[in-house]
Image (cartoon, rainbow, N blue to C red):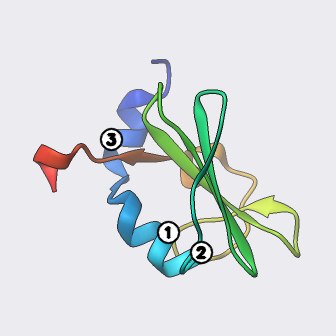
Amino acid sequence: ARHNDDWLERSVNINDITDKFTPGAIGRKKGYKIKYVGKDYIVLADMIAGYLRIIDKHAGGFVTLDGKVSKNDKETHFKIRKRKDM
């Protein structure tokens, strides 16, 4: 809830993100998170808070939507759009 306003500025369609960063990956549920593992990236979606993050497997850090590693949490958290918002 603390970061929700920041995340709303960067809302994304989870299907578009997984298609771009982890094409063909099947989401695996682990607790309240769903993890999509691809060749170069992992998409980690928090279904309770409604956000996702993208991890570069080789660099070991979170990335922005253009695939650049960033240590700025505001740049690497993305609000998942609800179906009605897409």
The number of numbered discs placed on residues in the rendered structure image is 3
Q: Residue furthest top?
A: 1
Label 1: element kind: helix
According to the image, label 2 marks what residue?
Answer: 22
Q: Is residue 62 left or right of 78 when viewed as pictured?
A: right
According to the image, label 3 marks what residue?
Answer: 8
Find the distance from the CA under tag 1 to the CA under tag 3.
19 Å
Q: Quadrant of the N terminus?
A: top left
Q: Nearer the viewer, mark 1 or mark 3?
A: 1
In the rendered image, residue 46, in percent from the top left (x then y), is placed at 55, 36
Q: Hey, what amino acid is under mark 3?
A: Leu
- Quarter of the image holding residue 34? top right
- Quarter of the image holding residue 86? bottom left
- Up the image or down, 31 lies above or below 13; here it is above
Marks 1 and 3, the one that precedes in the sequence: 3
Q: Are marks 3 and 2 in contact (CB under 8 Å)?
A: no
Mark 3 is surrounded, within 10 Å at the Cα level, by few (under 14), some (14 to 19) or many (20 or more) other residues, namely some
Q: Is residue 6 left or right of 32 when viewed as pictured?
A: left
Q: Are marks 1 and 2 in contact (CB under 8 Å)?
A: yes
According to the image, label 1 marks what residue?
Answer: 18
Residue at 75%, 53% (x, y): give it: 71
Q: Hey, what amino acid is under mark 2?
A: Thr
